[in-house]
Image: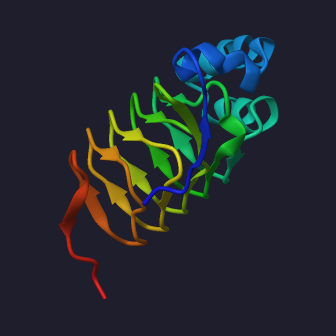
Amino acid sequence: MRKVTRYPVEGHNSLWHIYRTVSPWKGVRNFIFIQIARYCPVLPLKNWIYRRVLGMKVGKHTAFGLMAMVDVFFPEKISIGENTVIGYNTTILAHEYLIKEYRLGEVIIGENVMIGANTTILPGVTIGDGATVAAGSVVHKDVAAGSFVGGNPLRELRKQEE
């Protein structure tokens, strides 16, 4: 089960309530800097933007592949350990706006984690140290340290080595 906080809304779908939950200026500012980082080929500069401008926790030597997309409205809820690789065009979300509610949840990615290309990581999940997530996966639940998982729905692809 993902660790998210639920906020019910009345009336129109929750996305119509977005600027009650986050400043429009924060959204615009974050969007601009995320787009710069997505296409930046210089990893230290990319990580500096994530840490200093967006407020993410990003470990040393973590590498974001080209076009990786982090949450525009709540990037500060994302924490990534050292020496982790976030694959090409991966999306990391810390929020989800639904019809009758919106949800927020921290995303914690451990150290020495490999996230394959085109993966989507949903709010409220923890990916343990040394885990590998196969390309094209949807991470909708916690991933144990050292495991190799993939798919949609996410499942263990290979047993952990003891």
The image shows residue 152 at horizontal and vertical percentages of: 22, 45
Residue at 79%, 29% in the rendered image? 53
The image shows residue 106 at horizontal and vertical percentages of: 61, 50
Residue at 25%, 53% in the rendered image? 154
Residue at 75%, 21% in the rendered image? 20
For the C terminus, the quadrant is bottom left
Colour option used: rainbow
Q: Is residue 7 left or right of residue 68?
A: right
Q: Closest to the observer: 64 or 122?
A: 122
Q: Closest to the observer: 63 or 138?
A: 138
The image shows residue 94 at horizontal and vertical percentages of: 57, 39
**Residue sitting farthest toward the front:** 11
Q: Kindly indicate the quadrant of the structure image that contains residue 30.
A: top right
Q: Kindly indicate the quadrant of the structure image that contains residue 72.
A: top right
Q: Is residue 69 left or right of residue 35?
A: left
For the N terminus, the quadrant is bottom left
The image shows residue 54 at horizontal and vertical percentages of: 74, 31
Residue at 54%, 57% in the rendered image? 3
**Residue sitting farthest toward the bottom:** 162
